[in-house]
Image (tube, helix red, strand yellow):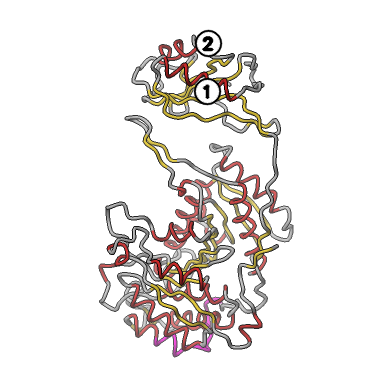
Amino acid sequence: MQNQLLKKDITTLQAGVKTKVAVAKGDGIGPEIMDATLRIMEAAGAQIEVDFIEIGEQQYLAGNTSGISPEAWEAIKTNKVILKAPITTPQGKGYKSLNVTLRKSLGLFANVRPVSALHPYIHTPYPDMDVVIIRENEEDLYAGIEHQQTDDVVQCLKLITRPGCERIIRYAFEYAKAYGRKKVTCMVKDNIMKLTDGLFHRVFKEIAAAYPQIESNSQIIDIGSARLAARPEQYDVIVTANLYGDIISDIAAEIAGSVGMAGSANVGTEVAMFEAIHGSAPDIAGKKIANPSGLINGAVLMLAHLGQTKVADRIKNALLATIEAGIHTADIYREGSSTRLVNTSEFAEAVIERLGETPQFLKTSKLSEGAGTIQIPDYVRKTRKKQLVGVDVFIDWKGEDPNQIGDALAAIDAFKLKLKMITNRGVKVYPKGLKETYKTDHWRCRFVAMDATTSTSPVYQPVDFEQVVALLSKLHAQGFDVIKTENLYEFDGTRGFSLGQGE
């Protein structure tokens, strides 16, 4: 089975049947820009039926910690498509991010942000910029799994999964193929995070091989971000993990001239959500001066997703023609280059007046010319031989001298397990650590089989789980404060954990 992610049933569209869409007007400037966007879509002939839902600040304050009413959940699950204006999350009191809740609960694994320059009508140093950032949307550090483990140390787990990597990377290449893009760039940090980012990079290489017609390359995220900010015209499609994608998406939108202009799609196998990338801007709410372009662009992405690409082109080209005409809201208005300062409603009217026109200088939208479908195969799990070869025991210890805790742990006789090393914040401090290394109260203590080799390339011997349990029992009996453990595994003989210095 394959999941079609781009278009609905075209025969249904041709029959004139409207698609029901859950629409959230949001908070702050949300209602103003949503009303403008809906007017434009209606005038353009979009075949949608609006089903308004209540989400956002008022739902939070009514006691729904996710910001979503039960009725809204039902409408979302029924309609499968959401057009959402920005919402406000009240400060404090443990309110959850509504966007994160929607993305994870609905499996919206792909965040798609097209960003292109509108030079010279909107100022940018990069007139040739035209990039699409495809960000993994569900895992990585944004899984939000955090713990305080000692007085000094908190942790956040970075979770990268093979199915998550396969879906987002396959989506990036399928998107490039569907929309005639020529290159996909992967951004990772696997020179440091060799297992997590290493998996993302490895899957990228595997999937890229299936698309020889599309150029592929990879970059370390720090230099990639710098190059994106300095030479964005060198990029076409970028695919990356959740945190990196969040950061570079905003970099791209900002250097293109205005964060307020960009739209965003959040796509899953069953449900898709479309929005502007900016916030609810409560400081200008009610003043009728907000720029609706970001949400209009989100609606264009939604219509393309629904297969209504001709209507999407009609709206996008009218929007571009309006911007070319110098009819601008306050956020992009510039004396000497803009011709008329308009409010939200007047901007929408200007777009409606230009429906059917195409821009003279900006790149014409041609979503209807050859846009294909995006299909992601179901994940097939491969089972590998998994062998326990040791355990990392994390201990809360307030001492300063690693030799003191190291010698005590090394003296423990625990069913043929031996202490191999101790690290503090990832740096080896025992045996033979450097006294200059700063140390906290969080000590990672690695125990392996007595007969494991100590060569430069260590060979780990199998251990039994009962040995680990016996070790933990002895540590507890001797007064060590064990705060967590991580079992060390090999998969088909390949090490599934990072080496410590000196191993």
Q: Give yes or no for residue 358 being in the magenta stretch.
A: yes
Residue pointed to by mark 1 = 469
Q: Is residue 239 left or right of residue 142?
A: right
User: Where is 137 relative to 223, above or below?
Assistant: below
Q: In the picture, residue 307 is in which quadrant? A: bottom right
Instruction: Name which residue lies at 67% across and 65% down.
Output: 177
- The residue range painted magenta reads 349-363
User: Which kind of residue does numbered mark 1 sit on?
Assistant: Val
Residue pointed to by mark 2 = 413
Instruction: Name which residue lies at 66% across and 70% down.
Output: 373
Q: CA distance from mark 2 to mark 1?
A: 13 Å
Instruction: Name which residue lies at 56% across and 77% down.
Output: 365
- Does dot 2 land on a helix, a strand or a loop? loop
The disc label shown at residue 291, or none: none
Q: Give yes or no for residue 408 being in the magenta stretch.
A: no
- 485 or 294, which lies in front? 485
- Does dot 1 land on a helix, a strand or a loop? helix
Q: Can you see residue 457?
A: no
Within-10-Å neighbours for mark 1: few <14, some 14–19, many 20+: few
- 53 or 424, which lies in front? 53
Q: Position of residue 324 (x, y in %)?
A: 45, 81
Within-10-Å neighbours for mark 2: few <14, some 14–19, many 20+: few
Q: Can you see residue 391?
A: yes
- 79 or 176, which lies in front? 79
User: Where is 217 relative to 263, above or below?
Assistant: above
Q: Position of residue 247 (x, y in %)?
A: 45, 53
Q: Is residue 329 left or right of residue 107?
A: left
Majority SS type along the magenta span: loop
User: Which kind of residue does numbered mark 2 sit on?
Assistant: Asp
Q: Position of residue 219 (x, y in %)?
A: 58, 48
Question: Which quadrant of the rendered structure holds the N terminus?
Answer: bottom right
